[in-house]
Image: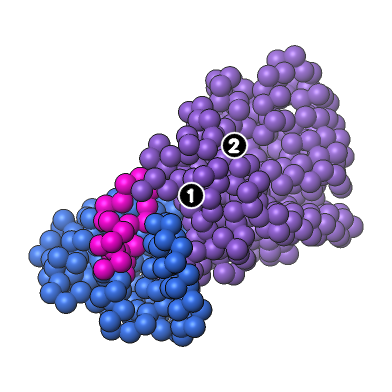
Amino acid sequence: LTSFNLESNPNKSNYNSPKYLDAKSQILLFQAANLNNLNLYKEAIHVINSILATNNYSYDLYLERAYSYFGLGKIDLAVNDYEEAQKYNVQPPFVAPKIFVDNVYIPKEKLQFSQGLLSGTIEGCKISAVEFLPSLLSCCKGMGYGLWCFVCSPSEVSQEFANSVYSLVQQIVSNTAKENLELFVPEIKELCLKWDFLDDHQKGLKIGFIIGKYGTEVFIAPAAVVKGAKTCYNFRRANTALTLQQISQSNVKKIKILEESSKRVTLQEQLIKEAVQKNKILTKSSNAQNHIMQEKHAWDKLIKISGNVEEDFKKLAALLEENNIIDKAFMKGEPQLFPATSPRINKVTYQKTIDKYTVRIECETYLDTGLTFIKDGWVVTK
Amino acid sequence: MNIEKINFLFKSCDWDSLFHLYTPIQIVKSLSFKDSLYTAYRLLYNDSWDEDIQDFAIKLFNEIRTHYSEAWNKSWEYEALLGLTYHITYRQDERYIAYKKAFEMVSHPPARLLIELARCCICPGPPPISYDDAIELIMEALKEAPYMDGIGLLCEIYSTKNNQEKENYWSEILKKSDKKIVSPIIEPRFLVDKYLKEIGK
């Protein structure tokens, strides 16, 4: 097929070096894709560069590096690679894109779905959401919020993006037990409950709203619950591809998207600062919540434990925030720095008596960003 | 085949690939004792401070302990390093076991080891070491120098004991103490030097 593509392409002469990846490079490219899926963009670039150094070039290679640069917020470099990738795009139209192989669900009324998606995303972008922090911590410079919506017509929404997001939500809806819906942001929970009663336009509207408000990353946790990581990765990639496609089309579109991106970044920074000022209790991962809510940490002395870790942690966070525990006044001992020889993390302890019980909280602050996360905490039982 | 690849990745300081592509057993079987240790050390201090990678570092340290038991048991430093790893990853029970073992392996425990072992009394649930024993260990360390980390820990312990008087006393000392006087680190020197060289410091 590869040789057929090459031979049959009338623009063959336009290619810089129409080579295809050798077996080793394909394995490395697969690793790079995995690194991108894990948000390890710099590492992915490192791997891709090592392939390029061996004079191996391909559409997938440049596209993968475009994803990496996009993830790092280096939009110009991402667009360059996206455009470079197009030079190697010799896939004939009759070859189904990869996305169809992996996904079964697609909207019946694609245009209506896309119209809804655009309107919903624009509406969602107007609303700031600090409740879902992981997206705020990403370095995508606001690009995960479906910013293509500001420059795109419904017919321009790529089939890849429409299908992947539809498929992802369908997978979440089909595979999530009702009790697990509590784990998601309220809009996803509502969407799951109403999914079967909505037409494609309404579905698009609601999904777009969620993307605009929280960013594409908000679907990561639900996808993890239903083990839909692959669908989720496809969706993220489709968002990236659609954004880059729109940016590369014209300078006007590029400026508009970058303007909107800049607005989102400013908003994100503002939200994080406000959260820090309000001594908001933030965790970096769900692991920390599970660890903190262990039975021996004795939180049952202060809150009613339901057994649902997420729910219980929310109650605990509210209690700790109410008591303003992350305050200099309650700092104990001296901060510890890690690594001691070249510090990047500052570990600080807070201790306060709440309802006659001594509560101890251990937080880590990233010295480069100033972001603080709770890592441990318990009621002192002696 | 794996040995060559793992050695190549080690020499390239490609820690993420080692983490993603190989198991702790494969790494330990391919690298020397010291190189395996440095890999685990580097994964512990991974650039993104990623918990999953730190978990992998713990597994790797434990694999090294099993595979190179003779070399591991030659120095208390390795067990202390494992204690530090557990401290960083908030595994308080395991932290105590590792520090205690290191403490038992050395006839004159260094100040930092005494302080870190004492720190084990601060944990959820019943502490594995009593507050009084912990205070004794810190006082032993402070005989060497007025280490700020030791004094700070004393403040914390007296606060937890609700001994306001002693807490105030040591807090005053802490305020007046030279913040630069910290007990010397107990991480194996070759790991620290290699790490600083790698990151260009």
Whether A203 is among the magenta residues is no
Q: Is residue A318 above or below residue A42?
A: above
Whether B126 is among the magenta residues is yes
Residue drawn at (59%, 53%) of the image: A325
* Front residue of A21 and B133: B133
Q: Position of residue B21 (x, y in %)?
A: 36, 53
In the visual, does A171 lie left or right of B51?
right
- The dot on residue A358 is 1
Of all residues, the one furthest to the top in this rendering is A197
| Chain colored purple | A
Name the tint of chain B in the rendering. Answer: blue
Colour scheme employed for the rendering of this structure: by chain
Nearer mark to the viewer, of 2 and 1: 1
- Residue extent of the magenta highlight: B115-136
Q: Is residue A370 visible?
A: yes
Mark 1 secondary-structure assignment: strand
Chain at numbered mark 1: A
Mark 2 secondary-structure assignment: helix
* Front residue of A120 and B137: B137
- The dot on residue B162 is none
Q: Is residue B187 visible?
A: no
In the visual, does B59 lie left or right of A354?
left
Q: Position of residue B115 (x, y in %)?
A: 31, 69
In the visual, does A69 lie left or right of A245?
left
What is the distance, in whole Å, between disc 2 and disc 1 at their CAs?
17 Å
Give the residue at mark 2.
A315
Of all residues, the one furthest to the right in this rendering is A252
All told, the count of numbered labels is: 2
Residue drawn at (60%, 57%) of the image: A326
Q: Position of residue A314 (x, y in %)?
A: 59, 38
Q: Amino acid at mark 2?
A: Lys
